[in-house]
């Protein structure tokens, strides 16, 4: 699964508005933000980059005023992991990823499970963007650019889903990338604090996962942020498969 997830990461970055490929790496940038979570690189599966290749990648980031940063499945590119560490890249985090297949998917069975919808109006997209910003404590601020990214995900063959709050706003939601390499990445599952504990994350996760399977994806994968969220995903049918490594180059190490 590591090779498949890494191949997906490459294909997904190649969808970004700005793409650079150098020395076995693919970098994908989003011009409307300098967020390191939306501007990063990943190695090709099996890449064996040289010191010069890593330096060229760092130069690409520097020329765009961005933090040199990568996300990848290290078992799919051990040579890249070694070369990056030699160049001074440091670990930000190691995240376990979980995978769901049509065979393991467990749709919610409760009659009281929240109704899940796809946003259709400007107001619904904006409400979802605001809800996710609140759910993640402002790591991603609500903005017109964030709304457009959600729209772009939906237009390009991915999925966006949300649950209304009792007053007609948005209680929480999530998005999923368009499939590539027979898999898709589900991300940004968030619920506003006032609405947690009501099955919203479980409902949107199951709905998006099922939607990707209906489009022909053989699996959907995601990363989780804590044991509470892991339990949510396991209830839907997600199971551990591997790890993803996040690395970046500290300022004092940059040429």
Image (cartoon, rainbow, N blue to C red):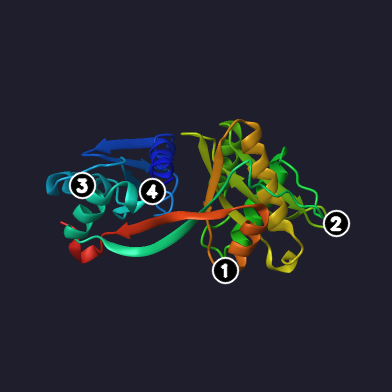
Q: Which residue is mark 1?
A: 227
Count neighbours of disc 1 (C-alpha within 10 A) and say few if under 14, some if 14 to 19, many if 20 or more.
Answer: few
Q: Mark 1 or 4, which is nearer the eye?
A: 1
Residue 58 in percent (x, y) is at 22, 49
Counting residues from the start of the chain, the first of labels 1 and 3 encountered is 3
Report the disc number at residue 99. Answer: none
Q: Secondary structure at mark 2?
A: loop
Q: Is residue 101 above or below residue 167?
A: above
Q: Quadrant of residue 219?
A: top right
Counting residues from the start of the chain, the first of labels 4 and 3 encountered is 4
Counting residues from the start of the chain, the first of labels 2 and 1 encountered is 2
Q: Quadrant of residue 21?
A: top left
Residue 234 in percent (x, y) is at 62, 58
Per the model, the C-alpha gap separating discs 1 and 3 is 38 Å
Quadrant the N terminus occupies:
top left
Counting residues from the start of the chain, the first of labels 1 and 4 encountered is 4
Name the foreground residue: 235 vs 157: 235
Tag 4 near tag 3, CB within 8 Å: no
Counting residues from the start of the chain, the first of labels 2 and 3 encountered is 3
Q: Which residue is mark 2?
A: 112
Position of 33 with respect to 91 (left or right) is right
Q: Mark 2 or 3, which is nearer the eye?
A: 2
Quadrant the C terminus occupies:
bottom left
Counting residues from the start of the chain, the first of labels 4 and 2 encountered is 4
Count neighbours of disc 3 (C-alpha within 10 A) and say few if under 14, some if 14 to 19, many if 20 or more.
Answer: some
């Amino acid at each position: 699964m590591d090779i498949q997830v890494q191949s997906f990461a490459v294909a997904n970055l190649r969808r970004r508005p700005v793409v650079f490929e150098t020395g076995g790496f693919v970098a994908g940038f989003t011009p409307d933000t300098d967020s390191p979570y939306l501007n990063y690189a990943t190695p090709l599966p099996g890449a064996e980059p040289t010191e010069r290749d890593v330096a060229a990648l760092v130069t690409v980031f520097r020329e765009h005023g961005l933090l040199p940063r990568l996300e990848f499945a290290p078992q799919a590119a051990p040579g890249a992991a070694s070369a990056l560490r030699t160049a001074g890249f440091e670990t930000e985090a190691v995240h376990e990823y979980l995978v769901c297949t049509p065979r393991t998917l467990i749709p919610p069975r409760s009659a009281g499970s929240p109704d899940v919808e796809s946003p259709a109006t400007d107001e619904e997209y904006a409400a979802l963007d605001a809800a996710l910003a609140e759910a993640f404590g402002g790591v991603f601020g609500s903005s017109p650019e964030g709304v457009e990214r959600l729209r772009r995900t939906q237009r390009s063959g991915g999925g966006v889903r949300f649950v209304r709050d009792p007053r007609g706003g948005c209680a929480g939601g999530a998005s999923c990338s368009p499939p590539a390499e027979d898999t898709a990445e589900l991300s940004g599952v968030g619920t506003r604090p006032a609405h947690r504990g009501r099955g919203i994350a479980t409902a949107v996760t199951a709905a998006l996962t099922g939607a990707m399977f209906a489009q022909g994806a053989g699996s959907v994968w995601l990363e989780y942020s804590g044991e509470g969220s892991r339990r949510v995903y396991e209830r839907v049918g997600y199971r551990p498969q591997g790890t993803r490594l996040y690395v970046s180059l500290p300022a004092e190490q940059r040429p």
